[in-house]
Image (spheres, rainbow, N blue to C red):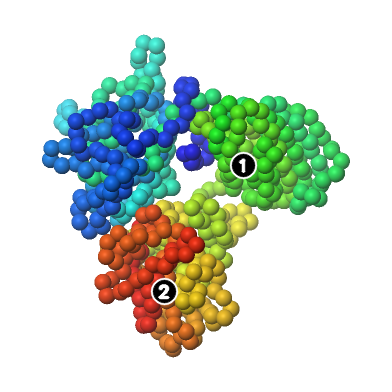
Amino acid sequence: MIKYFNSFRFSCVIALCVLVATLHAQISVPLQDMSFWQPSNAKNWQIVGSVTSDLVKEHVMKIGKGTGVLANLPDTKSRSNLVSVSEYGDVEVSFDFMMSKYSNSGFYLQGRYEVQLLDSWGRKDPAFNDCGGIFARRRFEPKEELFEGHAPIQNACLAPGLWQTMEIAFCAPRFDAAGKKIANAKMLKVRLNGVTVQENVELTGPTGGPISEKEASTGPFMIQGDHGEVAFRNILVNPLGSTPVKAGPMSYEVIYGAYRNADEFEGKPVDLKGTASALSWELTKRENNFVLKSNFNLEVIKPGKHEFTLQAGGNSILRVNGVPIMPQKWAYSTIERTATIDLPAGNIPVELIYFKMDDWMPPMLRLSLKSADGSSCDYQTFSSTLALTPPDPIYLDAKESTVFRSFVDYYEDGNFKKRMVHPVNVGHPDRIHYTYDLDNGAVAQVWKGLFLNVAPMWDSRGDGSSQARGMVVALGDKATLVTMAQMMDTSSIMGTNTGFRTLGYDLEEGNQPDFRYTLMGATIKDRLRITDGKYLTRTLEMSEGSPKEALFCRLAFADKIEEVEKGLYAINDFSYFIRIPKELTATVLRKDGKAVLYTGLTGSVQYEIIF
């Protein structure tokens, strides 16, 4: 299912767009053949099994035999655009794409409104024609010129040759019975590699290069094929406007008291009970020290995966069809929890328990569902979400090299893994940043774009954490330097027998840190620097002493590692690259579904992290 944003805000925007019921279900575009697209004699578009693109050479994309990938390889004779057979109005679409170096393409909604695809790697201040931009309109009188382009909020583009992800939510223009346009098209949301780069952008007319300057209620997808090499996979299309899953009458019970765990109020007498048409914490008639138990049935029409989003300030438990898809967890009012479950058609029982005992935190209760056919629905009253006033954003920009200490919540594959309690966030005006974990000498994550959101640290009582604002690539929370016996160790914390002790960091020229720690009797210096404004070069060296046992440098610890050319390794299905110098020899070790790329550490090791 296409993963989507803030369902409450999205529902409001969709309501404003007056969505028309289309009764379509989400589809996965077949990439075993070209049946989704209109027939063409052009040979630049083809179905292939794999693609790779050169980091250095311009406009080079190599293909492998098979199916599952749609590739565009234009030449002087074949450079046609690709147009879908079906037409769409309001729609969500998501896809993975890969660009060759300096390549240019675009994805058109209704064949008229272009979201730009471009190799924008390393661009600090993106324009409308950079990746994630909405291309400008074109007029010819009184002179030919471009106007009304919309630059992406920030550059979230990865390096050429890496798989990237784009998600688009589009609202078609509206027309009256006479065919007169009464509302412009809107690009509700564009996300590039998990970062929102466009939001609620009104489109007064077709952008440059459309299939027609005349607007319509529906139109086909079009992919630009005349400017450069590009490949696609995992194309998902969700026509919007399907019938949302309805909820039957809700019965509720309220128990008063301050409870921290669910077993504390089991068997306690009920203070209030009744039925309601929608969820609301206001049914408890107080703002704190209450337990609210709500039970209702969902009328599921289409079986399949259903994604629930719950926002509750305090403790909450959600059971769906008898399955505790969200066990008890405490969360601040602004935190969303999501869970997906396969549901059959029919009446599905839901039990939601919300209990709160923190008088300093505002109450909040919101439950939304994205169903198997892509429709979205909220099940709470509007007022149930109003007690929480959104905090003013507190942003930290890296206008110069910046070092910031805070807790950091670490995620892998979109899933929370742990809270790092001794990390260091390092920002740079080139808009390439990283988080270094002092507990194990690891570069846990890197990102580009904007630096930090520090509101979680300072808003209200705060929780001491900050969040990366840009496009984040998780590198792993495991130690970099290990012995051979520890090579496949999945622990993220150094063992007590290693003699590991952090020595903090020294600020060197340009206010950039060199990290230091002792390990196995040796003192290690760990330095990261930005190269060409595009990627990180990391150098580890033994500055003092010698280790009691041979040390090895784990350049990457991942599910999948493959060497795409001499010294260049693609990590986790082309999520990022590790590049080593010609004089360095590295080895890939695989065991139990995991892979490690490593090399020995005798004096120093230098390698590049490219993303």
Where in the figure is residue 266, as x and y percent of width and height? 82, 45
Which residue extends farthest left? 76
The correct choice, above or below, for 188 with respect to 442 in the image is above
The correct choice, above or below, for 220 with respect to 490 in the image is above
- Say few, some or many: other residues with alpha carbon within 10 Å of mark 2 (under 14 / 14 to 19 / 20 or more): many
Q: Is residue 246 left or right of residue 61?
A: right
- The residue located at (36%, 79%) in the rendering is 604
Q: Which mark is residue 550?
A: none
Mark 1 and 2 residues: CB-CB less than 8 Å, in contact?
Answer: no
Where in the figure is residue 129, as x and y percent of width and height? 27, 43
Q: Toward the viewer: 85 or 519?
A: 85
Q: Report the Cα–Cα distance between label 1 and label 2.
A: 42 Å
Q: Toward the viewer: 412 or 301?
A: 301
Q: Which residue is mark 2?
A: 553
Number of marks in the rendered image: 2
- The residue located at (49%, 81%) in the rendering is 519
Q: Secondary structure at mark 1?
A: strand
- The residue located at (79%, 36%) in the rendering is 253
Q: Amino acid at mark 1?
A: Leu
Does residue 450 appear in this view?
no
Q: Which residue is mark 1?
A: 310
The correct choice, above or below, for 144 with respect to 398 in the image is above
Where in the figure is residue 238, as x and y percent of width and height? 44, 32
Quarter where residue 169 is shown = top left
Which residue extends farthest top? 178
Q: Amino acid at mark 2?
A: Cys
Which residue extends farthest bottom? 545
Q: Earlier in the sequence, mark 1 or mark 2?
A: 1
- The residue located at (31%, 44%) in the rendering is 66
Quarter where residue 600 is shown = bottom left
The correct choice, above or below, for 475 with respect to 132 in the image is below
